[in-house]
Amino acid sequence: MGLDYRPVLWNKHKKVYDKWIAVSVLLYLLAFIGISLGTNAEITAETLIIRAFGTLAIALLHVVLAIGPLARLNPRFLPVLYNRRHLGVSMFLAALVHGAFSIIQFHTLGNVNAFRALFTSNMDYGSLTNFPFQVLGFFALIILFLMAATSHDFWLKNLSPKTWKRLHMSVYVAYALILMHVFLGALQQQPSLWSIGILSLGFMGIASLHLAAGIKEGKVDRGKSAQTKDGWVYVCEIEEIPEDRAKIFVLDKERIAIFKYDDKVSAISNVCKHQGGPLGEGKVVDGCVTCPWHGYQYLPHNGQSPPPFTEKIATYRVQKRGEEIYVYPEALAEGTAVEPIIL
């Protein structure tokens, strides 16, 4: 967390991951160019750039889409999640180079404006097999630009987390457009079973990861517990909650996190105010619940961020009966202090 906005909040880990991004991109481009020249010495520089950066953008997009479910399935991938924005911006820049050279190569030689030619050079919009595939790539690039341009926390704060999240979920719309762009291009230009096969495997991999993460999350949401006569809901035994960590529980379709820390138990909303991160998957650090995604912190007994920060989340009343923990299902106002259970 920072007190002010900075272009990049550099630290040791971010520098390491950014170096890995730069080295990986460079090695990929060198390998692609070397293989392409070795197999087709007559290929033009423009075509080589278009193909190299186009395939690079697609590869990076698959990595970006895989990071989320991988982090849900295994917390060891969380450090990569912290730097996903830089990877996303790198992917957009690669797609921008691909798109710019494509327009220069195919739409700037006539007497019609290049962008107008992009939409009018092929008017067969009613055909499935001959649809102007370049238009699909153009709209995907617009979405990727909006995501890259608003990737900084300044925009997340001023657009509001919900609006920002909806905007950045449009990456799946861009992914669908890119899949159709590549499939149609491969069918219309130079039919290649190899290209289509690689892209199909990538799609199946992304779909499988999201499905696996969804199944894992669904097990948490399906957890049910009987409500007692006085309205309290049984959660778990005290020993089921790890020290300085939480038990995630679902009440009225809302996830809450029951934390055990310093021989005390408190319950708060599971949703971080920053990007909706899962607080219950984080841990208590220096007396504060720390979000595993980007480090936002909240005091467990009142759901308030420590000063000078002002974020607040809902809290819940908790009760101990023998060795069992109960929670009252009605959320209290955000930032409401609740006396923790003393163990």
Image (spheres, rainbow, N blue to C red):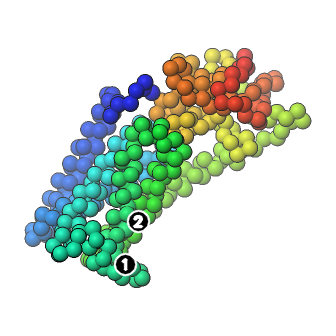
Q: 236 or 118: which is nearer to us?
A: 118
Q: Is residue 242 visible?
A: no
SS state under label 1: loop
Could you tell me which quadrant the C terminus lies in?
top right
Q: Residue 189: image x %, image y %?
A: 27, 77
Instruction: Report the side of 293 relative to 25 (left or right).
Output: right
- Residue displayed at 32% across by 52% down: 92
Amino acid type indicated by mark 1: Phe
Q: Nearer the viewer, residue 76 or 177?
A: 177
Q: Residue at x 50, y 58 (%)?
A: 208
From the image, tell me which residue sits under label 2.
177
Q: Quadrant of residue 317?
A: top right
As drawn, 285 above or below 101: above
Q: Residues within 10 Å of mark 1 (few under 14, many from 20)?
A: some
* In this rendering, position of residue 43 left or right of residue 215: left
Q: Position of residue 260 (x, y in %)?
A: 65, 24
Residue positioned 76% across, 31% down in the render: 327
- Location of the N terminus (image quadrant): top left
Q: Quadrant of residue 85?
A: top left
**Residue 184 left/right relative to 115:** right
The answer to whether residue 320 is seen in the rendering is: yes
Asked which secondary structure carries label 2, the reply is helix
* Residue at point 76%, 35% (across, down): 330
**Residue 131 - label:** 1
